[in-house]
Image (spheres, helix red, strand yellow):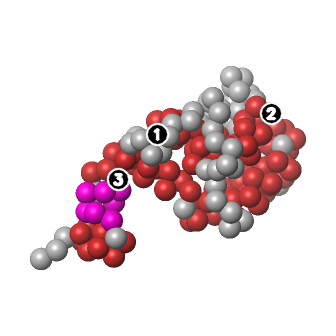
Amino acid sequence: MRSTAAIRSARSGSAPHGLGAPRLRLRVLLHRYGIDRELSDGGEPEGEPELQLRSRQLTCGAERHRLAGCLRKLIEEVEAVHKPQPLSPVLPVQREAVLIWRDSIIAIAGRLDRPMPVAAAGMARLRLLLTDGAGPLFNPTSDYLMADVLPRIEEDLDPNQGART
């Protein structure tokens, strides 16, 4: 009897111990923040299986559309008038910074929805922006500014550009 991984591999044409191997997927899941950081810093996906798999995950259509939706939701939320929640487990975003960079954020969301390829470095950098509580989206005293990060994301999304350090 064939394992589910072997059946899935046979359908996709990859080896059972390739990028779909359960241990590899688990390692990538557990270490995705560090792998994303490595990819955003110019790590080459061809080098290691973890980087290859994470690169595929980040650049797939579903992830692109999910992150584009997150960007649009971010804009929607900062444009809405909300009473501040005094006790909330959610980090508040830097509303003013998001409003200032609104057009750039919308342009990135639009770029993700287009059927053109994107580079893993840009996707990783975008994911870090959206999830790093110490980054400029959430922290007004971050080491980086939206003015540093957003143009770099736009540049790094271009697969012909390549990540720069």
Q: Nearer the viewer, residue 51 or 135?
A: 51
Percent x, y of residue 47: 42, 41
Q: Residue 25 carries which label?
A: 3
Task: Point out the stretch of residues depicted in magenta.
Answer: 14-20
Q: Judge whether residue 90 can be spotted in this image.
A: no
Give whichever of discs 2 and 3 has the lower sequence position.
Answer: 3
Q: Which amino acid does label 3 sit on?
A: Arg
Residue at (50, 50) in percent of width and height: 55
Relative to 19, is 106 on the left or the right? right
In the rendered image, which residue does mark 2 sit on?
147
- From mark 2 to mark 1, how far is it between C-alphas? 24 Å
Q: Which residue is drawn at 59% across and 43% down?
A: 121
Amino acid carrying label 2: it is: Ala
Answer above or below: position of 149 versus 113. Answer: above
**Near-viewer residue (147 or 44):** 44
Q: Return the disc, 1 or 3, that comes first in the chain's sequence.
A: 3
Task: Say which element carries label 2.
Answer: helix
Mark 1 secondary-structure assignment: helix
Hey, what amino acid is under mark 1? Ile
